Image: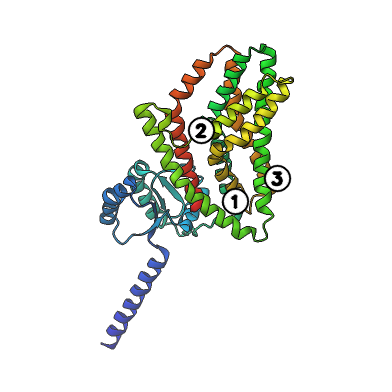
Amino acid sequence: MRKLIFRLSLLLIILTLNCTLAMETHPPVQLELFFSPGCTECEAVKKDILPEVAELYQGQYELHSHDITEPENIALLLAYQKRCDNRQNGKVSLVVDRTVFLSGYEDIFISLFDHLDQALANRRNPAWRIAEIPELSRQDVDERIANITVAMVIIGGLVDGVNPCAISTLIFFISVLVIAKVSRRLRLLVGMSFICASFVVYTAMGFGFIYLFKQVPDFELISRLLKVAVGLCMIPLAFLSYRDAWRFRKNAKPSSVTLQIPERTKKRIHSLINSRIGAGAPVIGGFVAGAGVTILESVCTGQGYIPVLTLLLRENITDMTAWGMLILYNLLFITPLVIVFICFQRGMEVTALINWSRNNLVLTKVLLGIFFSIMALLLLL
């Protein structure tokens, strides 16, 4: 009897040890769900796919949910993207066993169950070990942020360049050249000097903005406060841009546009252009007019310039990088002006330019609204 009890006890111990070893050797499959509140694809994954996973793989997996509106979860998402070499940016993402990245509802729906089966099969291999949770190094974070910054500099420069404030001023400048009846060659020189002045002055304004803020004793604190202040300002600007687009689309009246150069400033710009073009030295006059006009119209164009400058004030961007991005921004800022002037030189009528500007005002305002919205997110998050 004692031998029987001993053998049963020994068998029970062996079975317990085997179960324990099995649990240690075969941990549950790790699922990492990255979602954002209110996302329809995210809700569809939770409603349509995860219940089926729970039914088929009960006890064989662990689900970890991460809200990507929280900064630390964005860093984890970027770390998984880097590990899995995934460049897709689906609205919802799911990582299987910390090594397989599924992006978007369709990818998850099609591939998740196959990857779950494969993950369970991998556990039968004695050499298999689950991967560690990845960490994104400071250098990786800086590179990602730098890429975002470059993208916003490019978008900001182009959007600022097609800003109705800048284009309308150039159209008025061209119309003055037509009325003055200057020769085509002189017209080209005057236009080039006007655009060059715009580039030089706008770039100098950006240099001055960044330089002055970096001289502030408590630069880090001031920089953070400035980001928050500018980010908050972007919200009403985005709203007003969208409203301008809606109003102009509805009634096509320039007076319905809120974000534009104030009437008094417009008169000063027109007066400055009229007084300089036709002076003794038209090329110099064009440069002076371009410089003065750029300063005056910055009341309007600065709405897109200041958030980009604020983004460039980040402490992890070197001075040389910031200066390079500033020059890139301003080259892109004058690109639409150069294109418009080339079209004029090649025979486009002023009325055609005016019609083009009017026909594209809604699109421009929508693009400005999107730009302001993105800048608000980048500066406030």
> Rounded to the nearest whole Å, what is the CA distance between mark 2 and mark 1?
43 Å
Residue 197 higher or lower than 191, as above or below: below
Q: Quadrant of residue 63?
A: bottom left
Task: Work out which quarter of the rendered image holds the N terminus and state it.
Answer: bottom left
Q: Amino acid at mark 2?
A: Glu
Q: Give the label on residue 198, or none.
A: none
Residue at 47% across, 37% down: 259
Tell which of 153 and 67 is nearer to you.
153
Q: Where does residue 131 sit, x and y in percent of width and height?
A: 49, 58
Residue 178 higher or lower than 106, as above or below: above
Residue at 44% across, 47% down: 235
Contact flag, marks 3 and 2 (Cβ < 8 Å): no
On the image, numbered disc 2 is attached to which residue?
263
On the image, numbered disc 1 is attached to which residue?
142
Q: Where does residue 75 sit, x and y in percent of width and height?
A: 50, 54
> Rounded to the nearest whole Å, what is the CA distance between mark 3 and mark 2?
38 Å
Closer to the observer: label 3 or label 2? 2
> Rounded to the nearest whole Å, what is the CA distance between mark 1 and mark 3?
16 Å
Q: Give the label on residue 320, or none.
A: 3
Closer to the observer: label 1 or label 3? 3
Q: Amino acid at mark 1?
A: Asp
Secondary structure category for the residue under label 2: helix
Does the rendering let one see residue 204?
Answer: yes
Q: Amino acid at mark 3?
A: Met
Residue 123 higher or lower than 155, as above or below: below
Tell which of 117 and 33 is nearer to you.
33
